[in-house]
Amino acid sequence: MDIAIIGAGNVGKALATSFARAGHTVTIASRDPQDADSIAAATGATVAASNDAAAETADIIVLALPFDSFADVAAEIADAAAGKVVVDVSNRMSFGSNGPDIDTTSSNAEALAALLPGSQVVKAFNTLFASNQDDPIADGIQLDGFVAADDATARQTVLDLVASIGLDPVDVGPLARARQLEGLAFLNITLNIAHAGSWQSGWKLVGAPDTGKRAA
Ligand SMILES: NC(=O)c1ccc[n+]([C@@H]2O[C@H](COP(=O)([O-])OP(=O)(O)OC[C@H]3O[C@@H](n4cnc5c(N)ncnc54)[C@H](OP(=O)(O)O)[C@@H]3O)[C@@H](O)[C@H]2O)c1
């Protein structure tokens, strides 16, 4: 697959590494060209001159960005991303009087879908720390790669992508399930914060039902 990754931080680097290892063609864009250059040097990815240029050449566009950049980047890539799969890997957390919290009535992914109505937005990879996006085995166990999307074809495409990098793909249904996927990530993050974890923990649903839509 031809994959554009927009954002060259921890997730951009981890996914560029695992996608390239799986034989995909990867293009990466970043605000600071040096960040994309160093990932390209390490992975064999190609550096794009802009977010828009990266999206233009790809079949699948992965936003490896903080959610607060989504509105700006969506406006930049909307035309180039029309009719394409856009993968949201983002997580979120707010802080109130009871400490870290999450709004379970919305999701970043649904907000992104509203920003990119011409694209097929898919939630994936967010439940894995960057280290496990690169290496999908934790404690000797193959971690799950949960995928949510409203468009069934886009969901299947990303299930196949998830499987190609060694994760166990799990089809969780429509994009609104991103609320729960963002909740799973929130729980893993808060456990590591509260207990000084090593940030190596990940999710595996044992005895999962066969959804009939695993990797093709
Ligand atoms: N880290 C993890 O383990 C992990 C796991 C699962 C999901 N996530 C989610 O993945 C997303 C990225 O996390 P991360 O850890 O990779 O963050 P990060 O290391 O801070 O990297 C974010 C990258 O996005 C870039 N960026 C921001 N706005 C941009 C724009 N308008 N155009 C192009 N690039 C832009 C940043 O560039 P600058 O350096 O110029 O700001 C930076 O390279 C977040 O939504 C996070 O919640 C993270």
Image (cartoon, rainbow, N blue to C red):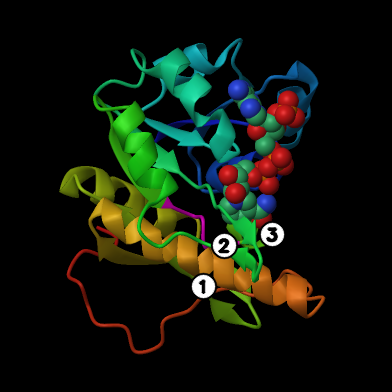
Residue 99 pos. (x, y %):
67, 68
Tell me what residue is drawn at x 75 percent, y 70 percent. Answer: 193
Q: Is mark 3 on a helix, strand or loop?
A: helix
Q: Is mark 3 within 8 Å of ligand 1?
A: yes
For badge 1, the amino acid type reads: Leu
Labels 1 and 2 touching (C-beta < 8 A): yes
According to the picture, the residue beneath numbered tag 3 turns out to be 131
Any part of residue 40 in sight: no
Labels 3 and 1 touching (C-beta < 8 A): no
Residue 156 pos. (x, y %):
25, 51
Q: Is mark 2 within 8 Å of ligand 1?
A: yes
For badge 2, the amino acid type reads: Leu
Magenta span = 124-128
Is 111 positioned to the left or the right of 137 in the image?
left
Q: Within 10 Å of the Cα at label 1, are there few (<14), some (14-19), or many (20+) other Cα atoms?
A: many
Q: Which of marks 1 and 2 is in front?
A: 2
Tell me what residue is drawn at x 35 percent, y 28 percent. Answer: 115
Is residue 127 within the magenta segment? yes
Residue 141 pos. (x, y %):
56, 81
Mark seen at residue 30: none
Decide which of tag 1 and tag 2 comes sooner along the chain. 2
According to the picture, the residue beneath numbered tag 2 turns out to be 128
According to the picture, the residue beneath numbered tag 1 turns out to be 143
